[in-house]
Image (spheres, rainbow, N blue to C red):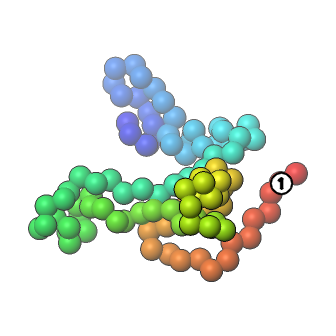
Amino acid sequence: MANLGGDDGAGDVRPSAEGFWDRLLSLGKIVWGVGVDDNNAFQERSLSDPGKSTPGRAWIVVQSTELTPFALHDAITSGNFYASTGVTLSRIVSARAS
């Protein structure tokens, strides 16, 4: 079932991850998307294998006035970040619907 949604065969039916996002956004909710890596393969021979789940493949880039825990927290909770797997953006412009 995972992120695709559907029926698990035991009667548990759920929407896809996109279905959850669509529902929340349609209700006017703010939903942040983040990038994280799934650290399952720490053996040296696994780190260079693109088929393995290894660290350092996704993260968030935070726009903050200071590099302090409080400033980073404020920036993240305000949505001043983007998820990346390597792309670097020099500028982000957001238009919020009224």
Give above or below for 73 relative to 12: below
Extreme residue in the right direction: 98
- Residue toward you, 23 or 74: 74
Is residue 15 found left or right of 39 in the rendered image?
A: right
Q: Which amino acid lies under the numbered mark 1 shown in the image of this protein?
A: Ala
**Quadrant housing residue 29:** top right
* Relative image position of residue 34 (x, y in whole percent): 52, 55
Rendered residue at 47%/58% (across/down): 35
Give above or below for 75 relative to 29: below
Q: Which residue is mark 1?
A: 97
Is residue 70 found left or right of 47 in the rendered image?
A: right
Give above or below for 34 relative to 26: below
* Relative image position of residue 26 (x, y in whole percent): 72, 41
Mark 1 neighbour density, 10 Å: few (under 14) some (14–19) many (20 or more): few
Q: Is residue 29 visible?
A: yes
* Relative image position of residue 90 (x, y in whole percent): 62, 80
Extreme residue in the bottom direction: 90
**Quadrant housing residue 64:** bottom right
- Name the secondary structure under disc 1: loop
Give above or below for 17 relative to 88: above
**Quadrant housing residue 6:** top left
- Residue toward you, 35 or 3: 35
Rendered residue at 66%/39% (across/down): 24
